[in-house]
Protein backbone atom coordinates (compact mmCIF):
# COMPACT_ATOMS: atom_id res chain seq x y z
CA UNK A 1 0.00 0.00 0.00
CA UNK A 2 2.83 2.42 0.87
CA UNK A 3 4.50 1.62 -2.44
CA UNK A 4 1.31 2.50 -4.31
CA UNK A 5 1.04 5.82 -2.44
CA UNK A 6 4.65 6.72 -3.26
CA UNK A 7 4.12 5.89 -6.91
CA UNK A 8 0.93 7.94 -7.00
CA UNK A 9 2.66 10.94 -5.43
CA UNK A 10 5.58 10.59 -7.82
CA UNK A 11 3.29 10.39 -10.86
CA UNK A 12 1.26 13.40 -9.71
CA UNK A 13 4.38 15.43 -8.96
CA UNK A 14 5.87 14.64 -12.36
CA UNK A 15 2.65 15.58 -14.13
CA UNK A 16 2.40 18.88 -12.27
CA UNK A 17 6.04 19.70 -12.91
CA UNK A 18 5.73 19.23 -16.67
CA UNK A 19 2.40 21.04 -16.94
CA UNK A 20 3.69 24.00 -14.92
CA UNK A 21 6.67 24.52 -17.20
CA UNK A 22 5.61 26.90 -19.93
CA UNK A 23 8.09 27.14 -22.75
CA UNK A 24 8.72 30.72 -23.82
CA UNK A 25 8.30 31.49 -27.47
CA UNK A 26 11.49 32.65 -29.15
CA UNK A 27 11.93 34.41 -32.48
CA UNK A 28 14.71 35.83 -34.60
CA UNK A 29 14.70 39.65 -34.43
CA UNK A 30 16.07 42.34 -36.71
CA UNK A 31 15.80 46.01 -37.61
CA UNK A 32 16.27 47.87 -40.90
CA UNK A 33 19.06 50.45 -40.75
CA UNK A 34 19.10 53.85 -42.51
CA UNK A 35 20.36 52.21 -45.74
CA UNK A 36 17.50 49.69 -45.70
CA UNK A 37 19.84 46.85 -44.74
CA UNK A 38 18.48 44.22 -42.35
CA UNK A 39 20.54 44.03 -39.16
CA UNK A 40 20.11 40.78 -37.22
CA UNK A 41 19.75 40.95 -33.44
CA UNK A 42 19.61 37.19 -32.93
CA UNK A 43 17.03 35.07 -31.17
CA UNK A 44 15.02 36.76 -28.43
CA UNK A 45 12.48 35.16 -26.09
CA UNK A 46 9.50 36.06 -23.93
CA UNK A 47 9.19 39.58 -22.57
CA UNK A 48 12.38 40.67 -24.32
CA UNK A 49 10.53 40.43 -27.67
CA UNK A 50 7.75 42.75 -26.51
CA UNK A 51 10.24 45.19 -25.02
CA UNK A 52 12.27 45.34 -28.24
CA UNK A 53 9.24 45.73 -30.49
CA UNK A 54 7.83 48.47 -28.23
CA UNK A 55 11.02 50.41 -27.49
CA UNK A 56 13.08 49.61 -30.58
CA UNK A 57 16.85 49.23 -30.78
CA UNK A 58 19.05 52.30 -30.31
CA UNK A 59 22.47 52.47 -31.90
CA UNK A 60 24.52 55.57 -32.68
CA UNK A 61 21.84 57.77 -31.12
CA UNK A 62 19.18 56.52 -33.55
CA UNK A 63 16.30 54.27 -32.50
CA UNK A 64 15.16 51.70 -35.06
CA UNK A 65 11.94 49.69 -35.16
CA UNK A 66 12.55 46.03 -34.33
CA UNK A 67 10.70 43.14 -35.97
CA UNK A 68 10.63 39.63 -34.48
CA UNK A 69 9.28 36.47 -36.08
CA UNK A 70 8.53 35.53 -39.65
CA UNK A 71 5.35 37.58 -39.97
CA UNK A 72 7.37 40.82 -40.20
Image (cartoon, rainbow, N blue to C red):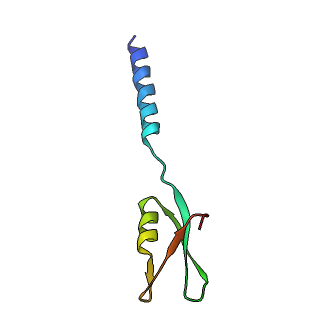
**Residue 72 vertical placement versus 22 (above, below):** below
Figure quadrant of residue 62: bottom left
Q: Nearer the viewer, residue 32 or 17?
A: 32
Question: Which residue sits at x=44%, y=89%?
Answer: 60
Question: Which residue sits at x=60%, y=64%?
Answer: 71
Quadrant in which the N terminus is drawn: top left
Q: Position of residue 2 (x, y in %)?
A: 38, 14
In this view, the residue farthest toward the top is 1
**Residue 11 vertical placement versus 30 (above, below):** above
Q: Is residue 39 left or right of residue 63?
A: right
Q: What number of labels is visible?
A: 0
Quadrant in which the C terminus is drawn: bottom right
Q: Position of residue 54 (x, y in %)?
A: 42, 70
Q: Nearer the viewer, residue 17 or 39?
A: 39
Question: Which residue sits at x=52%, y=59%?
Answer: 26
**Residue 21 vertical placement versus 65 (above, below):** above
Figure quadrant of residue 13: top left
Question: Which residue sits at x=44%, y=64%?
Answer: 50
Q: Nearer the viewer, residue 14 or 55?
A: 55
Amino acid sequence: MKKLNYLSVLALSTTLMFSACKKEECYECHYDDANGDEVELGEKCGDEIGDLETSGHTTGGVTYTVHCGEEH
